[in-house]
Amino acid sequence: MDVVVQGTTAYIAGDTYGEGTSGPIRGTAQVAAVDIVTRRLLWREEIKPDWQSYESLYVVGNLLYAMGRRPRGAWFAYDLTTRTIVMEGDLGGYGQFNGVDGRVFSWVHWTNDICELPTVPGREVTTLYDNVPRGWYNNPAFNFTPDGRSTWGMLGMDLARFPLPEK
């Protein structure tokens, strides 16, 4: 479903629905880490036993952010050092994670919100733009400006720039 690379490690999100199948072919979706230099599998895990599909991944520092498709809108931050979930919540839909300058953002269908996720446990998700009119056929996508202060995206059928608040 998604792959994100940090350094020489690729993190890959799986799904339980196989291509061309009518239903799940396994019980729980997996996440794996692969060394892209040696092509060796570092680990593969069923992090959340009730998840059937991942939608998006993002890594910042030692945190792997995962967004669910099944369950829709659920998310968690997984500490890659301790191999434990340190934060989790619900975004109300699925879409894309991305980030800039050590920050993590989500943009999801269903609620059409652009949010900033915490990078420190105990902090809250901050909604930056609420109910952005849909203009995406597939998942919304971030296109950050070179200075990281804004992202380009769709506002209905119009191209729009969304300023991001300063840290």
Image (cartoon, rainbow, N blue to C red):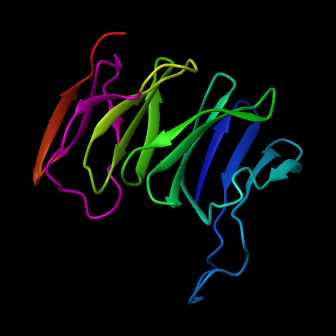
Side of 23 where 143 appears, left or right: left
Q: Nearer the viewer, residue 155 or 88?
A: 88
Horizontal and vertical percent position of residue 96: 42, 47
Image quarter (top left, top right, bottom left or bottom right) of the C terminus: top left
Side of 47 where 74 appears, left or right: left
Q: Which of 81 and 154 is in front in this view?
A: 81
Horizontal and vertical percent position of residue 27: 72, 72
Q: Which of 136 and 93 is in front in this view?
A: 93
- Against 88, residue 32 (above or below) is below
Image quarter (top left, top right, bottom left or bottom right) of the N terminus: bottom right
Q: In which quarter of the image is residue 125?
A: top left
What is the magenta range? Answer: 125-154
- Against 134, residue 98 (above or below) is above
Residue at 24 percent across and 36 percent down: it is 152
Count numbered badges in the picture: 0
Horizontal and vertical percent position of residue 5: 65, 39
Residue at 73 percent across and 50 percent down: it is 47
Residue at 89 percent across and 45 percent down: it is 38
Q: Is residue 143 magenta?
A: yes
Characterize the magenta stretch by its predominant secondary structure. loop
Horizontal and vertical percent position of residue 94: 41, 54
Q: Is residue 150 magenta?
A: yes
Q: Which of 39 and 154 is in front in this view?
A: 154
Side of 91 where 134 appears, left or right: left
Residue at 73 percent across and 76 percent down: it is 26
- Against 53, residue 166 (above or below) is above
